[in-house]
Amino acid sequence: MTQINQPPVFCEKYCFICKGAREGNALCKTLQNIELSLLGKNGCFWGQARTRYYGVTPDQKIPDHFNAENIGQ
């Protein structure tokens, strides 16, 4: 799990479903929609951590005020 005040890097950079869906991959978007319908609008626990930290659901891009430093790059 993500530590408090630490960015949830997995969903943003390593989850092939969420990352692919946000980049526009149709198969990943379909899989993500299934996941979100089964688990709720925030998705899995990595998606939930991402929602708490960035304030956006796993199917949305992070707000512009978060820079590359904030997502572990």
Image: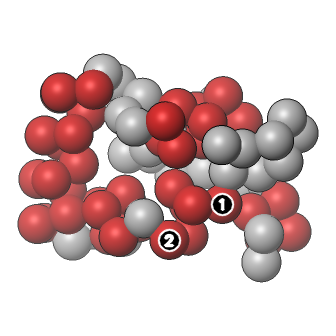
Q: Is residue 28 left or right of residue 61?
A: left
Residue 64: % across, % down: 71, 53
Label 2: few (<14), some (14–19) or many (≥20) C-alpha neighbours in 10 Å: few
Q: Earlier in the sequence, mark 2 or mark 1?
A: 1
Tell me the distance, in whole angstroms, between the alpha carbons under discs 2 and 1: 7 Å
Residue 32: % across, % down: 23, 48
> Tag 1's secondary structure?
helix
Say which residue appears at 42% left-offset and 64% top-offset: 15
- For disc 2, the marked residue is 14
Q: Is residue 34 left or right of residue 57?
A: left
Say which residue appears at 57% left-offset and 61% top-offset: 10
Q: Quadrant of residue 26?
A: bottom left
- State yes or no: discs 2 and 1 in contact (Cβ < 8 Å): yes
Q: In the picture shown, does residue 58 fall above or below 70?
A: above
Q: Quadrant of residue 21?
A: bottom left
Three-letter code for the amino acid on which mark 2 is drawn: Tyr
